Structure formats: C-alpha cells, structure tokens
Amino acid sequence: MKLHLRWQLLLALVGFGLILAILSFQVQSVGLCTTRVPSGGGVFTEGMVGAPQRLNPLLSDGFPVDQELVSLLFDGLVQYDHAGRLIPALAESWTVSEDGRSLRFTLRNDLVWHDGQPITTADVAFSYGLLQNEAFPAAAAVKALWQTVSINVVDNLTIEFVLAEPYSPFLEATARGIVPAHLLQDVPPAQLATHSFNQQPIGSGPWQVAPGQDWLTSRSLRLTPNPLDWREGTQIPVLEFRFYPDEESLLTAFANGDIQAINSVSDALLPQVTAVSHARLFTTVAPRYTQLIFNQSDSGFAPLQLAEVRQGLAAGLNRDVLIDRALNGQGVPLTGPYLPDSWANNQAIFAEAGVNAANADALLTGAGWPLSEGSSVRQADGESFTLRLLALDTAVYQQVAQEVAAQWAVLGVEVVVETAVSITELRQKLAARDFDVALVDITPSIDPDLYDFWSQEAIIRGQNYGGWNNRRASEALEAGRQVWGIGARRPSYNTFLSIYADQVPAVTLYQHVYTYALSSEVNQAAIGPIYEPRDRYQTFANWFLLYRDVTISCPAEETT
C-alpha cells in the first residue's frame, strides 16, 4: 500500500512540473519576436559585354575586359588613390636618386601569392623583365619603355630601376601587376601567351580565381575574396562574372534576374535599364573625356591654323546644351586636357584666357571670316567656311557630331560630318590627318605627362594628330617629365596649360560618366568614386543577398 502511494505522489509531482513548464514557456513566449537579419551565402553575379582573352596583367593592353579583370587579381608596386596620387601597393616605400635616374623600391615583408608562396623582388624582376624580352608578345609601346630600363635586384625586398635619363612618368609603369616567377620562369617567353596560367592565374590582388573552371567554354568566371585582403570576411563568398555577346542579351539577363549587376551601362542602354523595376543605378565620373581636335597641318582647312579661328569655334560651343541634347545629360562639362582630379588641372588658367560665347562672332570676323547679312555661312574671298568633322559611326558619336554641327551652324560655320566605320579606320584617318576637326575619346594616363599628345616630336612619332607645332608648349612638357615630385613638376604644366588655353589646339567637350546597375536584391551596397575596377567593391564586405529569421525579445510597448 505504501509503495502504491509513492508512485501516485511521484506522478503528481511530474505532472505539476509539466504544468509549471508549460505555463513558464507561455509566459516567456509572450515576450519573444521573430526578426530577419543578414545571412552569409549566395553568389553575386555581374554581367558584361565581351569576354576576356587572357587573365595576365602583362598581356592585357588593348583588351578592356582583360584589363578590368586583372585589376582585381593582380597588384603592382604602386597604385593610385582616390586623389589620383600614387601610393604604395606591393611596395612599402620608394626613393629617387639625386640625379633622377634611379628608383629604389622596398617591398612589404608580409606578401604572398594566392597559392601561399612568398612574393619577392625576384617576381618583380621576372615580370618587368619579360616586358624587355623581344620574344614576349607585349604591346610595342610597353616594350619600348621597359627596354630602356636596367633592373637590379638588391635583395629579396629591395629592387632598383635605373633609367637612361630622368623620366618621372615611369613611376606609373610600376603600377602594372606582376606575375609569379615560381610558376612561369621555366616557360619560354614566346609561349606565355598560350600558357594555361592565363586561364587559371595566381595573383596577389583582392580577388582570386576559383579553381576548376573552364570559363572559356562556360562564359562565366568565378572569383573568391582573398582572405588576406578581406580579413574580416565577406557575407557573399563568390563574385561571378558572366560574359554576353551584346547589350541586348545583357539587358535581358538583368531584367530576368539571371544577373544582379551590369558592369557598365552605356548611354544607349541607360533608358532601358532605368525602366527595369528592380534596377538601382550608381553613377560617378569616369577617367575619360571627349574632345574635338583641330587639324592645323597643311591637309586641314587652312583657317584652322589661326589661333583666333580656333578660339572662335571653341567659344561657339555650349557644353551644357550639347550634353543634354546628345547624351541625355550623361556627361560632365570639361575644359582643358586634364581630368578634374588631376593635380595638374588648373581651371583658373582657362578662366583667365577669357574666351566665351559673347566674343565668338568677333573672333571669327576679326580673323577675316565675316557673316554677311542674309547669309547663313561665313565667307572670305568667295570661299565658304566649311569644315569636315570626322566621327566614329555609332549612335552616340553621331549625336554629338550633329549637335556640334548645329551649334556651329548658328555661328555661321557649315559642317559636313564624315564617318569612320571602325576604330581602326578612325585611327588611320587621324594618322593621315584626313580631317579638319575630329571627334575623339581620350583616356589619359593619370600622370599628367602629355608629351606624346602635344609635343612637336609627337607630330611625327606620337598622337599629335592635329599637328600642333608649338615650341614653348613642347619644351614645357619635356621639362615636366624630367623632374620628380609634384612641386617640381607643377610650374612646367602651368606653363603648358597657359599656352594650350591661349592657342586652343583642341576643345574638350565633356567628361564621361560611369553608370553601374545593381539589383535591389543586393543589400547594403554603397559605391563611391571609381578610378579602377576594384574600387566599386570597396564596401563589398557589407553587401549581402540572404536573410535568416532569429528570435529576439520583443520591444516593450509604449504606454500613454
């Protein structure tokens, strides 16, 4: 009887405990809520028009997609910051000798390749040494520069470059990415262009190629964050690029949600991308501008040899109106041969030149080309003021060319737009000086050296397609490349700009803008100024695609 009573008491106690637990859970549940928080995972997919050839920084010249990707995968000794100034990358520091002919770099002592092998000056010497090798298929201009340089390895962390003469723009050449000697030093230079390294490279940059891919066949390339660059980790573990043959297929993929970003939205594509409901657009200025070059050689319209005529034509252009009408507002007015963030840019010099729309007519009339009453075109000695304007045969360039023609028509200048059906034909016509005025895009080096564009020597061996023959400007450009340091170089470039502003060998119309399209599916993305491709991923660590539900204490209700 007692034993039976014990079991009854035990069962009663267990039941009472269960009741207390249920009541306690119910009380606690009243104070709990569910919320969504960012979760790691997913693949961020970005589309672009075109496909890479070789993922190799020594072979990427002339291939925009290649250059875009190698910027993410490889580092050079130096890199540019957001103010357009060179700062250390693989190098910790550098010094210039007193005679200006020798640069000595010291590498950081913690550098490793993506495969974990150490980076030393042997890799630097090997990489830049390839650019001196006649058998290596690098760009001719790149070879010409490096073949004048002696490369001396001092020790594992110190390397010296000796120049034939002082040449300050050389520093920019060391921003080119380097490749690992331990993987490539036994490959004949002539065979490197077809080596498998170019498909599955090992670099040192913030991104690395995921193994086991055949992106030539799949037309997609997966990258993963380099943990040494993303020490805090990233929420999205994979960055995938997909390559499309044209903008139409790229737009379709974005609209359908197959990709979450468009690498670069062209002016022509912009209205259609804007119409996609989940599109978010990030716009910043691009390191490129469009310019009108005046042909001052004997093959051009003779009056263009007069500075007053070039000044009048420049004054007769309204950049703001041109950008609105021809580009749907996608451009930034720009004056002069330097981008706004260049340390050599000095807009005060152009303001002092005083050429404006109010005196356009006076300048042309004073140069002997009056506009008679009742006439629509200026004339002198029975000859009409008629210009041949050369432009690439694409929608955007033709729109710009037609707007230039319309604005100059108001000034009494007749314009005949001539087209070049390809970049190759445009370059041929420029080299032959088969134009009066040419509409061209310029992507200047960040270093302000414009010797190859505007010096007297560049008329014969360079890109001075307008044949501007000004000794003082040429001497200023030469002086600016023979000294080191911004302070020492600036006076020479101010002198050059003063002559340029007065003589107007060309008219810069606008700086291009870069537009990046991102799906609203991508959360917490912020994109600032973009000077090189890797810049748009500065905040990638904060981006996320997925959410997860977590239980939290409910916030206390407010009482009144």
Image (cartoon, grey):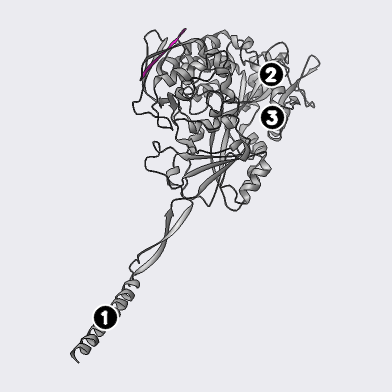
Q: Which residue is mark 3?
A: 404
Identify the element where label 2 is drawn: helix
Residue 518 image offset from top left, x and y in percent: 55, 46
Disc 1 residue crowd, few under 14, some 14–19, many 20+, Cα 10 Å: few
Residue 430: mark: 2
- Marked residue nearer the N-terminal end (2 or 1): 1
Residue 126: mark: none
Identify the element where label 3 is drawn: helix
The outermost residue toward the left is: 2
Residue 238 image offset from top left, x and y in percent: 49, 44
The amino acid type, in three-letter code, at marker 2 is: Leu
Question: Is 157 contained in the magenta span?
Answer: yes
Q: CA distance from mark 3 to mark 1?
A: 92 Å
Q: CA distance from mark 2 to mark 3?
A: 19 Å
The amino acid type, in three-letter code, at marker 1 is: Val
Q: Which residue is mark 1?
A: 14
What span is in magenta?
A: 155-166
Q: CA distance from mark 2 to mark 1?
A: 96 Å
In percent of the image, x 54 and y 13: which residue is there?
133
For the N terminus, the image quarter is: bottom left
